[in-house]
Image (tube, rainbow, N blue to C red):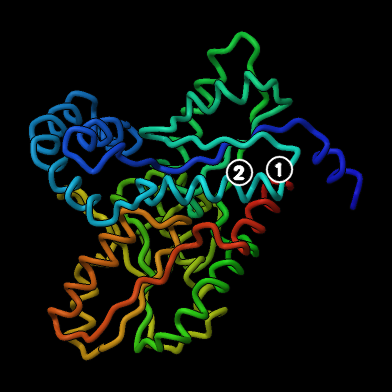
Amino acid sequence: MDLVTTMRENENVGILLINTGTTAAPKPAETREYLREFLSDPRVIDWPALLRWFVLNAFILPTRPKKSAEAYAKVWTAEGSPILAISRESLAGIKQRLPHARVEIGMRYGEPSIPKAMDALIAARVDRIIAAPLFPQYASAANGSALELVYSIAAKRWNTPNISALPAFYSDEGFLRAWEAVAKPKLDEFRPDYVLLSYHGLPERHVKKTDPTGAHCLQKSDCCDTITGANQYCYRAHCFATSRELVRRLRLKDGAYSTSFQSRLGRDPWLLPPTDQVVPGLARKGVKRLAVMCPAFVADCLETLEEIGIRAKESFIASGGEDLVLVPSLNAHPAWLDALAEMLRKI
């Protein structure tokens, strides 16, 4: 073990594992409060404040909480929300791998919250805090929002804590190796005709805003083929980079896989193609056994378990397919926790 690694393992480090969050209960009232916090974030809906408030309160909150609560109820477990239960299991695994660190969970929206987790780490008098947004591909609406909140909390302290941040890890060797370890046995067992790599969607304008040149992202057909200075923060480019590596590692056959984007909200142009149209379209083209991977999520949640595992499966079968399987996310798989611990050691 080299000197730098030894010094860091002896350091009093606080680790903040950040994910999006969850409703406190699969009921309309609790889900409304969660959605209000989530969709009020100007990095999520990047409209002028008054317009965002009007659309949220006039159109979204009157109807969406009931539908979302019903969706949550379909995947709720004895331990509560799947993403929270998985996060707690992952926290325990990281504590085992990094026993000298103080580890907390901080959800960007809902509980356990980032402010409370930050308070706990600061109260423990850690030497520094590693903020770890668990979003592999960078998006201002996810990574950017989480880090903005962490930095704003730190800035309000008289003794401003030392903050380090985990960067986007879409091409990290350990992350990719963990996906291979999770997906390969499932694909070997299911033997799909086709594999769809479905990522959380984003409005196209979010992608264009990351391009400092204004002339690259979504301006040419090959804009995501390589990572350059113009698209180094481009979510779409990161997603395709992840897909290329997973396709290679899993040895998927040409013509038997593609990438799509799910979870659209509103009428603005979002990244294409949309998963909810691709899935039934594949069935109509003759695909009978479809496997779906969701590499934008490190933990199974509403968007994977309900949107893909239930709704997409129903849509696929109704359109002529025989079966759709959701490849589990990384969750608390040992290969993923090993990879995450190694990334944290390097910060």
Q: Are marks 2 and 1 in contact (CB under 8 Å)?
A: yes
Closer-to-camera residue (132/10) = 10
Point 50% across, 66% down: residue: 242
Point 87% across, 43% down: residue: 6
The alpha-carbon separation of the residues under discs 2 and 1 comes to 7 Å
Q: Sort mark 1 into few (<14), some (14-19) or many (20+) by Cα contacts within 10 Å.
A: few
Above/below status of 230 relative to 244: above
User: Does residue 71 appear to the left or right of 244 in the view shown?
Assistant: left
Hey, which quadrant is residue 45 in on the image? Answer: top left
Hey, which quadrant is residue 127 in on the image? Answer: top right
Residue 213: horizontal and vertical position, in percent? 45, 47
Given the image, on which type of amino acid does mark 1 rest? Ile
Given the image, on which type of amino acid does mark 2 rest? Leu
- Residue, disc 2: 166
User: Does residue 260 appear to the left or right of 117 in the view shown?
Assistant: left
Above/below status of 94 relative to 254: above
Hey, which quadrant is residue 300 in on the image? Answer: bottom left
Whichever of callouts 2 and 1 sits on the residue coming sooner in the sequence is 2
Point 83% across, 36% down: residue: 10
User: Does residue 78 appear to the left or right of 33 in the view shown?
Assistant: right
Residue 238: horizontal and vertical position, in percent? 48, 59
- Residue, disc 1: 347
